[in-house]
């Protein structure tokens, strides 16, 4: 089976008997290589000593005095945040449990970058063995902001970080339309080029068509199905819908902040104006294979999932909403 998303560090981790990801020393050391923690030339001896000690033993206990001895205020804060995150990972048996605990307890003290990295590597684990490039590309939406644009009556999603790169003269109509730097090579995924994803999965340089009724939204539904099954151990069926008519929002999950606001309005029976409807990118129906795990008042009804873009056409998906907001009686991690 072909590999993908090497940048998430999944190859540095071990798996337990249930398929969960076990933290290894090599995985922890990867955080020490981040630019926020790698001591610059002007770093004080206390910071250099701490960094070297953790490279030797990344699980080593660090005292408050060692942090306090670091001269640079920003560096001290970075170390405090990273060590709190490290300790959280070590306390939990698997990354899946660590992620679930963060989502239940709140993530205010955890940088969004770390949360997205956890989602990235856990999703890589959930999608292990997947041979559909459309599902893998759609799954990037879980952990990377997307820029949306209309082109030839198609709603396209491209990686916002790629688009926001250094601006130079554009060299192709698609690159120009998306605001990409000229050196960025971006293709819209189609059957003729989909297999090239395996060689470029860590470049995040393929756009995907998310037009209603087409393959991209169905692929995202498959990625969400695997995510729920892996993190929660719950079997669900997720179907992409093409119409918003006659939908009873008895229970819904907004997959991003804008979608949640839209769902709130629909739940209250309010009508969406044309601009509000245009911001809905995806609408899904989720049903549980075992209705007995669902709370009574929604047991017989589907759960609706909404994905939306911001007024400036960005998608910032929050996969944690699928972890904490489903109407399940007892949420348990898979491992």
Image (cartoon, helix red, strand yellow):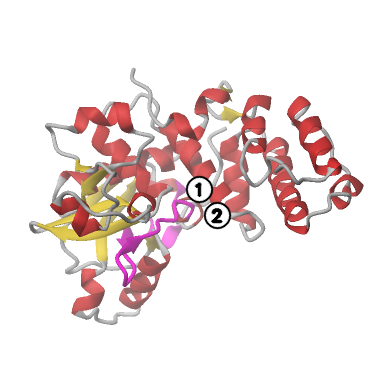
Farthest residue, direction top = 1
Residue 203 x, y percent position in the rendering: 36, 37
Q: State the residue in front, 251 or 144.
A: 144
Give the position of the N terminus as an image quadrant.
top left
Decide if residue 163 is in sight here.
yes
Q: Secondary structure at mark 2?
A: helix
Q: Is residue 126 left or right of residue 245?
A: right
Q: CA distance from mark 1 to mark 2?
A: 6 Å
Q: Residue 154, located in which quarter of the rendered image? A: bottom left
Does 202 sit above or below residue 270? above
Q: Residue 226, located in which quarter of the rendered image? A: top left
> For residue 163, which numbered disc appears in the image?
none
Residue 237 x, y percent position in the rendering: 30, 43
Q: Which residue lies under the disc numbered 2? A: 112
Q: Residue drawn at (26%, 53%), measured in percent from left and top?
A: 157
Farthest residue, direction left = 152
Residue 225 x, y percent position in the rendering: 35, 42
Q: Which residue lies under the disc numbered 1? A: 116
Q: Dot 1: few (<14), some (14–19), or many (≥20) neighbours within 10 Å?
A: some
Q: Is residue 197 left or right of residue 327?
A: left
Magenta stretch contains residue 261: no
Decide if residue 300 is in sight here.
no
Q: Residue drawn at (19%, 40%), measured in percent from left and top?
A: 189
What is the magenta range?
293-320
Does 17 sit above or below residue 55? above
Magenta stretch contains residue 319: yes
Task: Check whether the beta carbons of the residues at disc 1 and disc 2 lie within 8 A of each other.
Answer: yes
Residue 7 x, y percent position in the rendering: 47, 33
């Amino acid at each position: 089976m072909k590999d993908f998303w090497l940048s998430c560090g999944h190859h540095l981790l071990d798996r337990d008997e249930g398929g969960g990801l076990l933290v290894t020393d090599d995985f922890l050391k990867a955080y020490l290589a981040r630019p926020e923690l790698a001591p610059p030339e002007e770093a004080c001896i206390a910071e250099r000593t701490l960094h070297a000690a953790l490279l030797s033993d990344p699980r080593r206990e660090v005292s408050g005095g060692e942090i306090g001895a670091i001269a640079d205020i920003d560096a001290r804060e970075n170390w405090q945040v990273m060590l709190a995150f490290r300790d959280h990972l070590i306390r939990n048996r698997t990354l899946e449990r660590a992620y679930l605990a963060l989502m239940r307890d709140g993530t205010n003290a955890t940088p969004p970058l770390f949360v997205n990295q956890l989602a990235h590597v856990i999703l890589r684990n959930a999608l292990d063995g997947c041979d559909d490039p459309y599902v893998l590309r759609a799954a990037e939406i879980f952990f990377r902001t997307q820029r949306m644009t209309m082109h030839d009556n198609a709603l396209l999603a491209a990686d916002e970080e790629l688009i926001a790169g250094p601006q130079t003269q554009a060299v192709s109509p698609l690159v120009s339309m998306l605001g990409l730097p000229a050196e960025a090579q971006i293709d819209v995924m189609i059957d003729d080029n989909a297999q090239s994803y395996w060689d470029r999965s860590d470049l995040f340089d393929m756009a995907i068509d998310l037009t209603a009724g087409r393959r991209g939204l169905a692929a995202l539904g498959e990625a969400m199905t695997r995510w729920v099954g892996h993190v929660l151990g719950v079997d669900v069926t997720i179907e992409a819908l093409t119409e918003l008519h006659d939908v009873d929002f008895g229970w819904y999950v907004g997959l991003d902040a804008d979608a949640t606001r839209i769902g709130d309005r629909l739940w209250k029976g309010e009508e969406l104006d044309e601009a509000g409807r245009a911001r809905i990118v995806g609408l899904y129906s989720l049903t549980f294979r075992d209705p007995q795990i669902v709370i009574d008042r929604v047991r017989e009804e589907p759960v609706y999932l909404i994905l939306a873009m911001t007024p400036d056409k960005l998608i910032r998906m929050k996969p944690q909403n699928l972890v904490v907001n489903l109407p399940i009686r007892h949420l348990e991690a898979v491992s």
